[in-house]
Amino acid sequence: MKQQYATECPQFFTATIQEWKHLLKEEIYKIIIVNSLKFLVNEEKVIVNSFVIMSNHIHIIWQSKNNNSIKKIQNSFIKRTSKEFKKQLEKDDKLSAYSVNAIDRQYNFWQRDSLNIELLHPLLNYAGLVGRRPSLGAHV
């Protein structure tokens, strides 16, 4: 099988839990994040260079792979994690904390203003900056 490489520059992505709630404080929700990243890697959609999970937001440095659009990858990640958060929050009887009054959804876990920055400068150690954050972080 032919080796596939990243097709875009690395991207710095930040996503925040709705209203800065501390959803990611519990281990099970961190595992949902990690498993969602693993899924994207195993599907050969993305290369994850580094990530860190804090109690209410995440930072990821990743690159699209096989001509996948970074926007589609982000949407897939947000959708997948939201679906899993909903399942787990139902089990934990905490889902009502994420209820919203919106036309297109009943619950919302992520804020809509995710940050994405293309990392163009090759001499900066972006992964090192992400790795210095306080919670569960990894270089993959």
Image: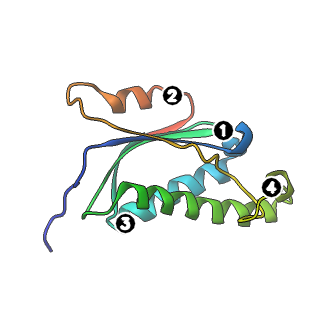
- Residue for badge 3: 42
Image height of 108 relative to 23, above or below: below
Q: Are marks 2 and 1 in contact (CB under 8 Å)?
A: no
The residue drawn where x is 65% and y is 52% is 29
Q: Nearer the viewer, residue 15 or 104?
A: 104
- Of callouts 3 and 4, which one flags the residue occurring earlier in the amino acid sequence? 3
Question: Which labelled disc corresponds to residue 56?
Answer: 1
Give the distance between the C-alpha atoms of the residues marked 2 and 1, in whole angstroms: 13 Å
- Residue for badge 2: 133
Q: Are marks 3 and 1 in contact (CB under 8 Å)?
A: no
Please state which amino acid type lies under the numbered disc 4: Val
- Residue for badge 4: 100
Is residue 15 at all visible to an observer of this figure? yes
The residue drawn where x is 86% and y is 60% is 93
- Of callouts 2 and 4, which one flags the residue occurring earlier in the amino acid sequence? 4
Please state which amino acid type lies under the numbered disc 2: Arg
Image height of 75 relative to 138, above or below: below
Give the distance between the C-alpha atoms of the residues marked 2 and 4, in whole angstroms: 30 Å
Q: Are marks 2 and 4 in contact (CB under 8 Å)?
A: no
The residue drawn where x is 68% and y is 59% is 85
